Amino acid sequence: MTQPGTLFLCPTPLGNLEDMTFRTVRILKEAAAIAAEDTRHTIKLLNHFDIHAPLISYHEHNKAERGPGIINRLLRGDNIALVSDAGMPGISDPGMDLVRLAIEENIPVVPLPGANAALTGLIASGLDTTMFTFVGFLPKTNKHRRELLAKLAKHPYTMVFYEAPHRVRNTLDEITNVFGDRPAVAARELTKKFEEFIRGSLTTVIQHFVENQPRGEFTLIVAGSHGDIETVQEADSLVGLDIVQAVAELISRGVNKKDAIREVASQKGLPKRQVYQTILESNLN
């Protein structure tokens, strides 16, 4: 039987080409093909390092179609390299799905170390790095975004978000509305010529972008809540309950009705007035 090839996960520079590793260059040169998010972007990188392996377009909108074809090539013995547009493949990109398919078929998956925006921004943020949570891009729909932020509001560890320049101010506003003001850092254009860290609090970072047009790709690092782990677990237990059930659950724990309404509004990202009206109509004692 033919031995399967290997799926190599190859990180690419965030911007500074000197961050490409010798090993990654070698693997890309030896690969039978390179699966890339944006082949027009990746070809520039390959040309710079004199790499001539053929490219396969593999991105969020064609992964269901292209994934099985890549797996078939791996099963036939081809070594395939997977790259992201920048940074580590599989982080906030469809590489995760290809890795799962490969594992299901017992195809070897070999990760190469290299550039990653989340860790690069985190270690220079000055915020706590002992324990942290990578959130990445927030959901696109308002409802799902509010729900996730509400769930994270009392998370005790440093959080790392990704955001595009045209949305960064709105995202910071939404985070502040749910989290309240707390230490935060916006890292932009990491490893590039205009790399910059805007350090302070959520409100001071927002003010910076009121006065300065956001440019470049952003990594946002936000301090965790001062609440303890027990509080976080209690907040998580409200997820999945409707408004009336959530308020009733808190009341059963000894929380007074007014505070329960305020807490549920915060957790679900809803106006307190809306929660109060729902409880009023439910005749909850």
Image (cartoon, rainbow, N blue to C red):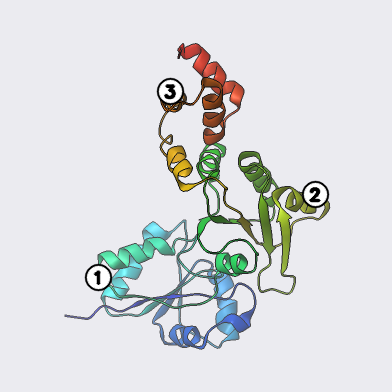
Foreground residue, 198 or 36? 198
Q: Examine the rendered structure and indicate whether residue 274 appears above or below residue 137.
A: above
Badge 1 is on which residue?
A: 106
Find residue 43 and report its horizontal and vertical position in percent: 56, 77
Most extreme residue toward the left is 1
Quarter where residue 56 is shown: bottom left
Question: Separation of disc 2 and disc 1 at Cα?
Answer: 51 Å
Badge 3 is on which residue?
A: 248
Task: Give left or right: position of 199 versus 40.
Answer: right
Of callouts 3 and 1, the N-terminal one? 1
Question: In the rendering, which numbered label is found on residue 210?
Answer: 2
* Circle 2 crowding by C-alpha within 10 Å: few under 14, some 14–19, many from 20: few
Q: Examine the rendered structure and indicate whether residue 184 appears above or below residue 170.
A: below
Mark 2 secondary-structure assignment: helix
Of callouts 2 and 3, the N-terminal one? 2
Of callouts 2 and 1, the N-terminal one? 1
Find residue 242 and report its horizontal and vertical position in percent: 43, 27
Q: Examine the rendered structure and indicate whether residue 221 appears above or below residue 193.
A: above
At 68% across and 45% down in the image, what residue appears? 181
